[in-house]
Image (cartoon, rainbow, N blue to C red):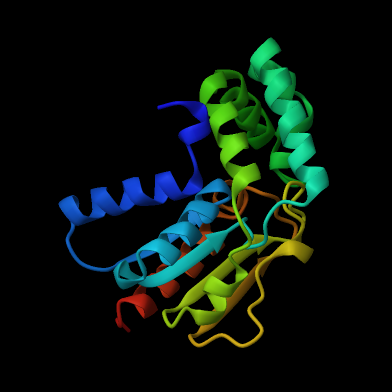
Amino acid sequence: MDEKDVTVEAYADAISSFCRKAAPGPVALAGHSFGGYVALAFAERHPGLVVGLALVSSRAIADSDATRRGRDEMIGKVRAQGTAVLLPGLAERLVGPNADPKWRQAAKTLIENANPDAVIRGLRAMAARPDRSAILEDLRAPLLVLHGDEDGLIPVSEVARPENPRGPVTMTILPGVGHMPMWEAPEATARALVAWAKAAHGRP
């Protein structure tokens, strides 16, 4: 597939196809960061399949013009120099300032081993996505918004906060945690996700 054809909507449709084959019926869908953008697109395009939605370290708004320009610049750099060009800045911003140093090293390793073409496709898809805040207002299923208050990539001020939601909303803001709560606060993250998933499926 051409890199220009890779969109969050295309990812959402691929997940829909997988779900229909692997586990027919509605799903509680959680997405972290880029995955949150895909989850929102999934909820928009396949609402009948969604009984719960969770956005982890993500947001519903579209990129600003400045952010889009930054992504375009980064695409050029990654194409010319590979993913190493993302270091050290991205690794530092992926985890909170007080996180165990092993997680910063883990982030660095992930970036170094990332496929440049995949990174370019992801950057392009993120830049093209629309504002999907309205999806959360109309969502009747349980919504979980889980975010670290020291997220260096997506500031906590940008988390989705539906004003007049039709369904139940749980806001979980983790103190001292950065963009990777599943690393930095695994127990709190797991508790929040398990409680949300049970509510989505109507289980006590």
Decide which of 55, 98 is in the foreground and name it.
55
Decide which of 98, 167 is in the foreground and name it.
167
Residue 20: image location, x then y, percent: 20, 56
Residue 85: image location, x then y, percent: 73, 19
Residue 77: image location, x then y, percent: 73, 19
Q: Tell me the quadrant of the picture where the N terminus can be found.
A: top left
Whether residue 195 is visible to the viewer of this picture, yes or no, is yes
Q: Tell me the quadrant of the picture where the C terminus can be found.
A: bottom left
Q: Is residue 200 above or below residue 28?
A: below
**Residue 37 occupies which quadrant of the picture?**
bottom right
Q: Is residue 198 above or below residue 159?
A: below
**Residue 146 occupies which quadrant of the picture?**
bottom right
Q: Residue furthest top?
A: 81
Residue at the spot x=48%, y=85% of the render? Answer: 167
Whether residue 115 is visible to the viewer of this picture, yes or no, is no
Residue at the spot x=50%, y=61% of the render? Answer: 40
Horizontal side of residue 193 vs 127, given as left or right: left
Q: Is residue 156 above or below residue 109?
A: below
Horizontal side of residue 91 vs 120, given as left or right: right
Q: Residue furthest right?
A: 66
Residue at the spot x=61%, y=25% of the render? Answer: 111
Decide which of 137, 171 is in the foreground and name it.
137
Decide which of 28, 110 is in the foreground and name it.
28
Residue 161: image location, x then y, percent: 67, 75
Count of residue discs: 0
